[in-house]
Image (cartoon, rainbow, N blue to C red):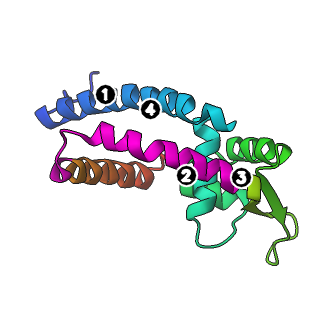
Amino acid sequence: MRAAAPTSSGDALTDLILTMFRVNNLTLTWGDRLVAPFGLTSARWQVLGAIVFAERPQPVAWLARDLGANRQNVQRIVNDLHAEGLVAFEPNPHHRRANLVVLSEKGQQAYDAAIATYEPRVNVLAEGLTLDEIETAHRVMATLRKRLEDEGGAS
């Protein structure tokens, strides 16, 4: 028995999803090249960014939640960052075994260097796109993210 055929909106969303897959892969490759001079990868840069943007030091599980990523993958990346002196662990007053992850001075320098390289490049990528187009794309992506999370697609 065949499932219902996609609607016009379903077909358009399928095209968007396929494009998102391609853009995601290209973005990760672009990011890897961008931050390689600082000893980072896109994945490491994402984790550093999650630490920077957190309101306070967080354990790995919370960083993974914020990133929408698998906790074990984030733990592996945090362990690598720790081994390279980019992050440090602090005691968590609320949980003995779940240390808080904080940037070291070296980690802050690597993150700042990556952002300084990123900002002019992202401005070039934004050329020719209106603010309204970017904001509309963001709203669509945010809605898809929320619906997928509600459906149980979050890690």
State the image coordinates of residue 47 (x, y, percent, origin top left).
63, 49
The residue lying toward the viewer, choosing from 71 and 114, is 114
Which three-letter amino acid code belongs to the residue tagged 2?
Leu
Q: Which residue is mark 1?
A: 19
State the image coordinates of residue 77 (x, y, percent, origin top left).
72, 42
Q: Earlier in the sequence, mark 2 or mark 1?
A: 1
Q: Which residue is mark 4?
A: 27
Q: Which residue is mark 2?
A: 67
State the image coordinates of residue 56 (x, y, percent, origin top left).
65, 73
Q: Earlier in the sequence, mark 3 or mark 1?
A: 1
State the image coordinates of residue 87 (x, y, percent, origin top left).
77, 54
- Secondary structure type for disc 2: helix
Q: Earlier in the sequence, mark 2 or mark 4?
A: 4
Discs 3/1, front: 3
Above or below for 60 versus 80: below
Distance between the Cα atoms at labels 1 and 4? 12 Å
The residue lying toward the viewer, choosing from 86 and 61, is 86
- Magenta stretch: give its range: 107-133
Distance between the Cα atoms at labels 3 and 1? 33 Å
Does the residue at mark 2 contact the one at mark 1 (Cβ under 8 Å)?
Answer: no
Q: Which residue is mark 3?
A: 107
Q: Earlier in the sequence, mark 3 or mark 4?
A: 4
Above or below for 8 versus 109: above
Q: Earlier in the sequence, mark 1 or mark 4?
A: 1
Q: Is residue 30 left or right of residue 52?
A: left
Residue at 88% x, 70% y: name it: 96
Residue at 44% x, 32% y: name it: 27
